[in-house]
Image: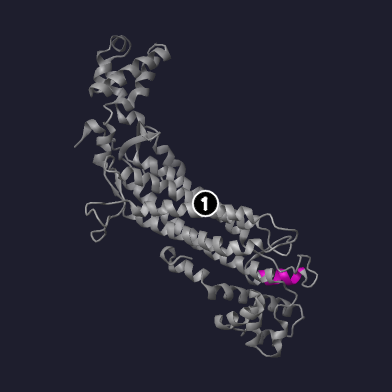
């Protein structure tokens, strides 16, 4: 964990004391399971539930033993009396580490799920607020055809919901325990003890395992986190572009006390969005580590362990932070509808070229001829600054094929946005009104 990018809720899950506390919960659940089936006396089971540890003592033992789990179990045992002999009965290290790790990852993914819901709520509120705000849609970074800001955000909401489904699936996949012994055969700890212990911990039971839970589960979680980070990167990149001075349609929150540059007092940089894009690169790289950890030797080697101590903690912590940061961006996002309307007319009507071409086709002109005609007039509009509507209105072939009223209708933004609210209906967020959208030629 890097403190700068760690929220308190996630720090509470992954700090070092919590790491061993989750293991303590597993050890005690197994003791209770053994006691349930008569292997451990009930009075000893009750005494063992008081087992405790200190980080200092674990460290002291590990410096000599060079084995973390043995150091932890020894530290627990030292807090007890003769009943300590029942600790770690029939277990291997990974029984404890992987089951405790499942508890931690489940808690972390639950925390991320809560953050994700806040982000979706913020995006939906903004979309409903700007449901009649028209803007230009872009492809290849260039002006394409009109959309609404609401429609852009509808795409974001749909993607956030897919993200939630992926994270929930990863959460369910990882929320299983494994108490099956050194190679997973239950030779020294029967399946019923595993089932009882996992039930105590509200975990599922891995149907089959080796010495470890299979690492495709962890890879799935890391990949779901990488996709979540990439989604946030996509949104942040959009904001970064739309905040550029020459675009100026959106702006991330910029408090009066905030500084944009150490040298240029005027700067209002999209630094929070840039931070999200930067951290997404780390989370995506971590997913590769998860995939590499799937292929281990035989019933288990330990090459995954050191890497997981970094990538599982960092990916969950970073995604949690990124969601927290992006929720704040969306809740304070400045939207400039006037600038959006101005940008709609930046190309002097060329954004209606397809509608003009199709109108000519429907009026009887060959499609390629219509395409070439409109393309030539678009080039003229770009060269002269004259509006495409005026150029087409004077063209002899256009006059022959299209009445003036029909040509004027080509340049009506409503024509292009007639169906965009269907996206919100499909998302279950359809709160419509009949207010016409305003284009660049209808400025207040």
- Residue 380 is drawn in which quadrant? top left
Q: Is residue 412 toward the left or the right of residue 283 in the image?
A: left
Please name the colour scheme applied to the rendered image: one colour
Task: Give me the residue at 31% from left, 13% from top.
Answer: 398
Q: Position of residue 421 (x, y in %)?
A: 39, 38
Q: Position of residue 193 (x, y in %)?
A: 74, 72
Residue 189 vs 44, above or below: the answer is above
Q: Is residue 162 toward the left or the right of residue 394 in the image?
A: right
**Quadrant (top left/top right/bottom left/bottom right) for the C terminus:** top left
- Residue 353 is drawn in which quadrant? top left
Q: Main secondary structure of the magenta part?
A: helix
Residue 414 vs 40, above or below: the answer is above
Q: Is residue 311 magenta?
A: no
The extreme right residue here reads 187
Please name whichever residue, 56 or 352, is drawn nearer the observer in this view of the structure.
Answer: 56
Which element is circle 1 on?
helix
Q: Is residue 195 magenta?
A: yes
Residue 336 vs 22, above or below: the answer is above
Q: Is residue 388 visible?
A: no
Residue carrying label 1: 284
- Badge 1, how many Cα within 10 Å: few under 14, some, many 20+? many
Numbered range of the magenta stretch: 191-198
Please name whichever residue, 224 or 412, is drawn nearer the observer in this view of the structure.
Answer: 224
Q: Position of residue 72 (x, y in %)?
A: 63, 78
Q: Is residue 287 visible?
A: yes
């Amino acid at each position: 964990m890097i403190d700068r990018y760690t929220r308190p809720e996630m720090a509470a899950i992954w700090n070092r004391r919590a790491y061993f506390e989750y293991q303590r919960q597993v050890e005690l659940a197994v003791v209770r399971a053994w006691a349930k089936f008569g292997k451990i006396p009930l009075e000893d089971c009750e005494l063992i539930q008081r087992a405790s540890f200190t980080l200092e003592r674990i460290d002291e033992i590990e410096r000599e033993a060079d084995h973390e789990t043995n150091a932890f179990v020894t530290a627990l045992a030292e807090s007890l009396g003769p009943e300590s002999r029942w600790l770690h009965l029939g277990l291997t290290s990974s029984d404890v580490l992987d089951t405790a790790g499942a508890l931690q990852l489940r808690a972390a993914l639950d925390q991320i799920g809560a953050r994700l819901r806040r982000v979706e709520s913020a995006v939906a509120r903004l979309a409903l607020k700007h449901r009649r705000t028209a803007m230009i849609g872009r492809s290849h970074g260039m002006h394409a055809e009109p959309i609404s800001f609401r429609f852009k955000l509808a795409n974001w909401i749909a993607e956030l919901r897919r993200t939630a489904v992926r994270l929930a699936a990863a959460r369910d996949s990882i929320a299983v325990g494994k108490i099956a012994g050194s190679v997973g055969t239950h030779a020294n700890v029967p399946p019923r003890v595993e089932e009882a212990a996992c039930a105590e911990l509200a975990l599922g039971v891995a149907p089959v395992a080796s010495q470890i839970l299979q690492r495709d589960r962890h890879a799935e979680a890391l990949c779901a986190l990488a996709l979540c980070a990439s989604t946030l990167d996509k949104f942040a990149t959009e904001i970064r572009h739309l905040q550029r001075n020459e675009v100026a349609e959106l702006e991330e929150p910029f408090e009066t006390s905030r500084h944009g540059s150490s040298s240029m007092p005027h700067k209002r940089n999209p630094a929070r969005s840039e931070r999200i894009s930067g951290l997404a690169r780390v989370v995506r790289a971590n997913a590769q580590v998860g995939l590499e950890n799937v292929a281990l030797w035989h019933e288990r080697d330990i090459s995954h362990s050191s890497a997981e101590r970094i990538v599982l903690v960092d990916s969950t912590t970073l995604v949690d932070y990124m969601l927290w940061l992006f929720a704040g961006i969306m809740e304070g996002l400045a939207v400039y509808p006037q600038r959006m309307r101005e940008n709609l007319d930046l190309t002097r009507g060329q954004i209606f070229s397809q509608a003009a071409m199709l109108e000519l086709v429907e009026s009887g002109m060959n499609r390629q001829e219509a395409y070439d005609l409109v393309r030539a007039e678009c080039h003229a509009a770009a060269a002269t600054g004259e509006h495409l509507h005026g150029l087409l209105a004077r063209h002899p072939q256009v006059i022959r094929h299209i009445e003036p009223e029909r040509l004027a209708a080509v340049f009506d933004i409503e024509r292009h946005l007639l169906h965009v609210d269907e996206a919100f209906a499909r998302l279950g967020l359809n709160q419509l009104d009949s207010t016409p959208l305003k284009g660049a030629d209808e400025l207040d």
